[in-house]
């Protein structure tokens, strides 16, 4: 019998909404709050909380600016975030391919 050892999944990224945010930012490098809200179909409050958790971990940077006299929040993935997302992807791949062992 072969024992499979699964890698630990990053609990910060593993949340569905945070995973969606990281996936979007990994592909686009940056996105504004409205875009993230629309793409994730999230509420303003929940999105704000999840962005805060990713920011606290150092996975994203959040900047505020004005566009056409309206406040705009921009989220940008950090190098630490890219690395964490890449490692998370590798860990998930190990889970998905483990049945082949």
Image (tube, grey):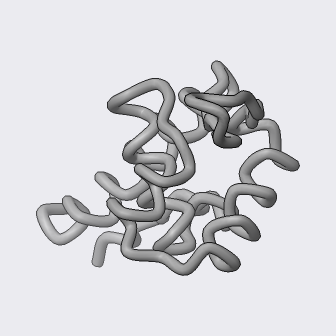
**Along the line of sight, the residue nearer the viewer: 69 or 2:** 69
Q: Which quadrant of the structure image shows residue 77? A: top right
Q: Is residue 32 above or below residue 30?
A: below
Q: Residue 49 at what x, y percent from top left?
A: 75, 70
Residue 52 visible somewhere in the drawing: yes
Q: Residue furthest top?
A: 79
Residue 32 lies, in percent from the top left, at 52, 41
Residue 94 falls in image quadrant: bottom left
In the rendered image of this protein, does residue 13 appear above or below residue 15?
Answer: above
Quarter of the rendering occupied by the C terminus:
bottom left
Image position of 13 with respect to 26: above or below: below
Q: Position of residue 20 (x, y in %)?
A: 42, 59
Position in image of residue 93 (x %, y %):
29, 52
Residue at screen point 73% across, 28% down: 65
Task: Depth check: give the residue in front, 33 or 10.
Answer: 33
Q: Residue at x 47, y 74 (%)?
A: 16
Decide if residue 56 is on the left or right side of residue 99: right
Residue at left offset 37%, top offset 58% = 92
Viewer-side residue, 28 vs 87? 28
Q: Is residue 22 left or right of residue 47?
A: left
Q: Is 7 above or below relative to 89?
A: below
Decide which of 9, 25 is in the foreground and name it. 25
């Amino acid at each position: 019998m072969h024992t499979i050892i699964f890698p630990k999944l990053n609990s910060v990224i593993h949340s569905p909404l945070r995973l969606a945010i990281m996936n979007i930012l990994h592909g686009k490098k940056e996105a504004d709050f409205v875009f993230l809200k629309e793409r994730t179909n999230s509420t303003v409050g929940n999105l704000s909380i999840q962005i805060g958790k990713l920011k606290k971990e150092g996975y994203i940077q959040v900047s505020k600016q004005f566009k056409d006299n309206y406040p705009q929040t921009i989220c940008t993935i950090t190098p630490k975030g890219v690395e964490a997302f890449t490692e998370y992807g590798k860990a998930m791949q190990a889970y998905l391919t483990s049945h082949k062992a």
